[in-house]
Image: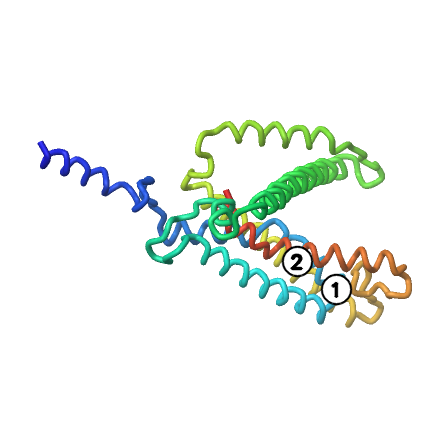
Amino acid sequence: MEVSMEAGNAGEAAWLDDDGRPRRTGTLWTASAHIITAVIGSGVLSLAWAIAQLGWVAGPAVMLLFAVVIYYTSTLLAECYRTGDLATGKRNYTYMDAVRANLGGAKVTFCGIIQYANLVGVAIGYTIASSISMRAIRRADCFHENGHADPCHSSSNPYMILFGAVQILFSQIPDFDQIWWLSIVAAVMSFTYSGIGLSLGIAQTICMFAARFHPRGVPRGSARWISLKTLSAACLVVSIAAAAGSIADVIDALKVYRPFSG
């Protein structure tokens, strides 16, 4: 009887981690897909605009600054995955578990408020961005059908409602975050719009050089050629702050550890 029970427990143990939870089945490919999906966010589409606002010196400098901060915070989060011994200590499966195990007290409540405020802000940001994008597609179709003389005015409110309804529907799917192919699809999407952004940047650069060396051509329509004298101090500060925020969104550490943050 004892032998049969031990054999049964051994069979179950093969499918469990050291803390009794189902054994993780991630591979190098799935982990890479998660990282690519997290790091290459939709903010990469605004990267060209951000660099144009900050310039070729401040722009890369801000990117390097945020990269150093993200590297430090990412390393810190990785070190907090286990409490105590790094190899055998208790696992912290969520961000709040890590805060509770390492800080405790009122700091848990404070960090929880910050985390959920960030999640609410991200949800609002994506809802607005998606509605603006869908309205832009609708307006482009309108211009294609009626010509640019038509103002093609439309409201983004229906698209916000539609996006919210889809999010509510998806949130009802059990273990949605455990779907293995989800990050593969998202990684393909990340490469797709990164490729689009890179292609448009190359095309714009070619057009600018062509216009510069053309006998009658003068580059127009680029933020790089706007004189700072024509901008008020307030507009300049807002543009710089928005550009820095866009760069921070591109390399946001919270995205890398979103599954960890629970």
Q: Position of residue 145 (x, y in %)?
A: 75, 35
Q: At x 42% / y 39%, what residue is drawn?
A: 178
Q: Quadrant of residue 229?
A: bottom right
Q: Quadrant of residue 106?
A: top right
Q: At x 75% / y 35%, what residue is drawn?
A: 142
75 left or right, relative to 52: left
Q: Residues within 10 Å of mark 1 (few under 14, many from 20)?
A: many
Report how many numbered discs are placed on residues in the image: 2
Q: For the residue marked with disc 1, what is the amino acid?
A: Leu
Q: Residues within 10 Å of mark 2 (few under 14, many from 20)?
A: many
Q: Which residue is mark 2?
A: 247
Q: Quadrant of residue 62?
A: bottom right
Q: Which residue is mark 1?
A: 54
Q: For the residue marked with disc 2, what is the amino acid?
A: Ile
Asked whether the residues under the numbered discs 2 and 1 touch, taking CB atoms below 8 Å apart as contact, a structural biologist would say yes
Q: Residue furthest front?
A: 105
